[in-house]
Amino acid sequence: MKKIIMGAALAASLLTTQAVAAEVKNGTFVGVEVGSTSYDLRSENKTFPNLSGTDSASGGSQSIKLGKYLGNMGRVYGILGRVNADGGDITNFGVGYDYLIYNNSDFTPFVGLTLGHQQFDIDGTNFDISGLTYGIELGVEYTLNKNFGIEFGYRVNLNDSKETLTIRNSSVYADQTIDYTLEGAKIWYIGANYHF
């Protein structure tokens, strides 16, 4: 009798976990993320090549996303984010797709792709670097209940953000032409999702 009761309790807990996961799979969600972002900014001075180089910097990031779970097909979402970086601010927006690896637990690993646009505004100037951004991400979502979940992830964004700055100097010095390239970003984040 004891074994039957234990078996029934175990079956009920598994069904409850699967019922929560099944509701989450098909619903609309809104989420927020905070994290830490690092990136590389490369400068290539066409006039004085010895002044070229790469600077690494980092900053805190915040994002909001709105999306929909597509059953066993994963989830899609739109994302708007901002990085408060050393030397400037990065604003990005785009879309993402995550393939969710469902199992019989409250932890759902995922792997995803992102595509969007970003703009890096350099502090103290009217100069910005903008362009297409694309990347991959890995993470895990933990289901707290049928409406709330938290997730942890790592995202790598690559891009073609490149701009040229020409500095006009007096007749004593030559004009300088500098190509700036934002080479990518690496983002660790934690997020909270509300499922409708």
Image (spheres, rainbow, N blue to C red):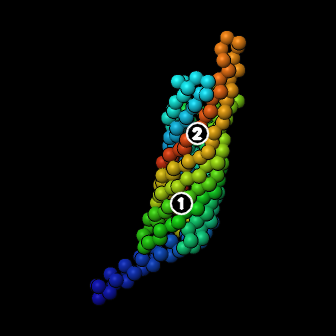
Q: Residues within 10 Å of mark 2 (few under 14, many from 20)?
A: many
Instruction: Give the amino acid type for the residue marked by disc 2 in the picture.
Output: Leu
| Circle 1/circle 2 CB separation < 8 Å | no
Residue at 52% across / 24% down in the picture?
50
Disc 2 element = strand
Q: Which residue is mark 1?
A: 112
The percent coordinates of residue 13 (x first, y second) are 41, 76
Mark 1 to mark 2 CA distance (whole Å):
22 Å
Instruction: Give the amino acid type for the residue marked by disc 1 in the picture.
Output: Gly
Could you say which disc has been placed on residue 91 in the image? none
Which image quarter is the N terminus in?
bottom left
Judge whether residue 23 can be spotted in this image: no
Q: In front here: 187 or 7?
A: 187
Q: Which residue is mark 2?
A: 182
Disc 1 element = strand
How many discs mark residues in the rendered view? Answer: 2
From the viewer's perspective, is 121 left or right of 154?
right
For residue 105, above or below residue 49: below
The percent coordinates of residue 125 (x first, y second) are 67, 27
Residue at 59% across / 68% down in the picture?
69
The percent coordinates of residue 91 (x first, y second) are 64, 43
Of badges 1 and 2, the one in the foreground is 2
Q: Residues within 10 Å of mark 1 (few under 14, many from 20)?
A: some
- Could you tell which of marks 1 and 2 lies nearer the N-terminus? 1
The percent coordinates of residue 108 (x first, y second) are 46, 65
- The residue at the far left in this view is 2
Residue at 47% across / 58% down in the picture?
139
Q: In front here: 91 or 107?
A: 91
From the viewer's perspective, is 150 left or right of 29?
left
